[in-house]
Image: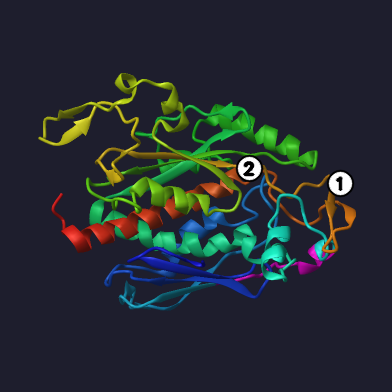
Amino acid sequence: MNTFGHLFRITTWGESHGGAVGVVVDGCPPRIPLTEADLQVELDRRRPGQSKIVTQRKESDTARILSGVFEGQTLGTPILILVWNEDARPEAYEGFKESFRPSHADYTYFAKYGIRDWQGGGRSSARETIGRVAAAAIAKKILSLYWNTEVLGWVEQIKDLKASVDPEAVTMEQVESHPVRCPDLETASRMMTLIEEIRKQGNSLGGIVRCVARGVPVGWGEPVFDKLEADLAKAVMSLPASKGFEIGSGFAGSMMTGMEHNDEFYTDETGRVRTRTNLSGGVQGGISNGELIDLRVAFKPTATIFKPQNTVNEKGEPVVLKAKGRHDACVLPRAVPMVEAMVALTLVDHALRHRAQCGETV
């Protein structure tokens, strides 16, 4: 499927080396202030060429709103956003025309459809996420305006280098202060050195993006199949190169006892029910409990590396392939706004669903 969401729905379109990519956003409430500049802030965080440690494809990723906005406000009708591909170089992929790149979608797409776009992977390319990030700029506006909810991600780990960051206090300014998007500057510096070393070797690295949502009210999420954490997992696991999802204590919780893991309730001085710990990650029974939504997404090393690899062609014959072109040695810095995007899109959809069903009762 190319469509995500229920009440707030997005449909992304376009291929990596086609004419353009973009998104249609349907279900956006009317009278939300929105300009192309609002979208550009988020797209600039995702775009290639922004530092020496990411792909040097030169794209401005300039967003154009073609419908759904009038005099700076949303109309409540579908919003079409377009971004032209300005620096597509399909000739760089000519050598992959008949060979399957290891750990890419080349083989599975060909096996499923009998045809594939070998020019940068087509729809399987991370360039598809432009539409998600543009749509999420709208979702973030809605969350902020109606519920004062903030979504923020950062690079927590690259290979075995792990940052120490306070999820309650970290700010966007701190995250954006370093090209790696790790607010622990000492660790960020070590991460950058490691990425540069791996890039020179023609190899790649993976890691973990951590993302939090602050100010999420109690009550978002739907039992039984559309539990909030289930939809968050689906959302972030739909991103290219994502391989793992945790919320709250995650897999570490399996090593604890119930006494150690349970989040005890108390009533604070304002009369609000709180939990003393947050090992649940802000979700209990599939519904937000008012605490910090806290999740992690694991990303594999970039599949494209500049070393010879054994593979097969479309006839099943063995060949040796060495990649060319412009690629990220580590996707993590650019994955941060992508993770934020999918979290924001999931939250705004559940917020609107909750409002439709229950009103603002909690």
Q: Identify the residue at image location x=39%, y=67%.
A: 9
Asked if residue 285 is positioned above or below residue 130 in the image, the reply reads above
Which residue is under mark 2?
Answer: 300
Instruction: Specify the color scheme.
Output: rainbow
Q: Is 61 covered by the magenta stretch?
A: no
Q: Quadrant of residue 152?
A: top left
* First in sequence: mark 1 vs mark 2: 2
Q: Identify the residue at image location x=44%, y=33%.
A: 250
Q: Quadrant of residue 192?
A: top right
Asked if residue 269 is positioned above or below residue 175 in the image, the reply reads above
Q: Identify the residue at image location x=79%, y=43%.
A: 202
Q: Position of residue 264 (x, y in %)?
A: 23, 26
Asked if residue 334 is positioned above or below residue 164 in the image, the reply reads below
Q: In which quarter of the image is residue 291?
A: top left
Q: Where is residue 297 in the image (x, y as percent from the top left)?
A: 51, 42
Question: Which residues make up the magenta segment?
Answer: 83-94
**Residue 339 left/right relative to 96:** left
Q: Which mark is residue 308?
A: 1
Find the distance from the CA under tag 1 to the CA under tag 2: 19 Å
Front residue of 318/18: it is: 318
**Residue 272 left/right relative to 174:** left
- Amino acid bearing label 2: Lys
**Residue 216 left/right relative to 119:** left
